[in-house]
Image (tube, rainbow, N blue to C red):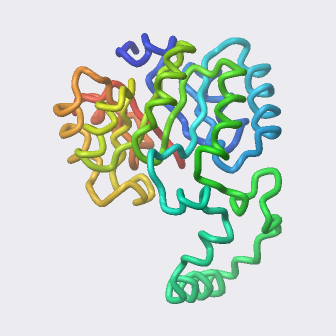
Amino acid sequence: MRTRVTKMLGIDFPIFAFTHCRDVAAAVTNAGGFGVLGAVAHTPEQLDIDLKWIAEQTHGRPFGVDLLIPRKYVGAEVGGIDGGALKAMIPDAHREWIEELLARYGVPPSSRPTTGGEHGMAGLRIDPKSMAPLIDVAFAHQVKLIASALGSPPRWLVDRAHANGIPVAALAGRLDHAVAHKESGTDLIIAQGTEGGGHTGDIATMVLVPQVVDAVGPTPVLAAGGIATGRQMAAALALGAEGVWCGSV
């Protein structure tokens, strides 16, 4: 299967796998797709270990890294918001709803450390100071794609990636977001409908994808959100996408 995206990245199939698991990223890359490691909660040391491991397993096949690299964000004036500050912003009603849900289905407390750790999301930070070391590690390992999962990537990142011969992708849940991504110099736009966990907006994938394709052409578009079968992938291509971006599957 050949599309502009397979040519851009040197892959056999235009299937991208976003995952926090290095094993999955390596397996998809080895199968001819493109593994993308979600690394926002990694420390630079852990990311170095994981990317080295993926490279060893994939023997020169391409893979990428996904980070949260917004142009602007709440807390910028104080250098970013850590996990504790984010937790404090959660409304009490939402906390109560989560606690009731966990109790109803007998979900035990997490055994992971609450202060971050190897893969702990509690250590999450969303700011350039924290992301820069991760980006340094990604470039050092010559990843073939940098994806920004939160807003249009800043110009400095796009310029640095292009200087290293690395294309940049960004997720969009609305048409205006996709247009902003294109204007930022993004090479690959991921149109993710609400089926993708609901975190990108409330527009359905089948509605969003053709809107984005028409608006940002000739920039290639990947379809995301609820895509888990060959028929759904065929539908995405029929809507004008150059490939698909999958998470849970």
Question: Quick one: which residue is furthest to the front in this view?
Answer: 77
What percent of the width, then of the height, locates residue 89?
A: 55, 76
Residue at left 49%, top 17%? 162
What percent of the width, then of the height, locates residue 11?
A: 51, 15
In this view, the residue in front, 112 or 161, is 161
Q: Would you say 175 lies left or right of 107 here?
A: left
Quarter of the figure with residue 218: top left
Q: Is residue 224 above or below residue 214?
A: below
Q: Is residue 25 above or below residue 227?
A: above
Residue at left 51%, top 83%? 91
Quarter of the figure with residue 36: top right
Quadrant holding the N terminus = top left
In this view, the residue in front, 123 or 206, is 123
Residue 58, visible in the rendered structure: yes
Q: Would you say 183 lies left or right of 167 here?
A: left
Q: Is residue 138 above or below residue 97?
A: above
What percent of the width, then of the height, locates residue 15?
A: 47, 28
Residue at left 75%, top 57%? 120
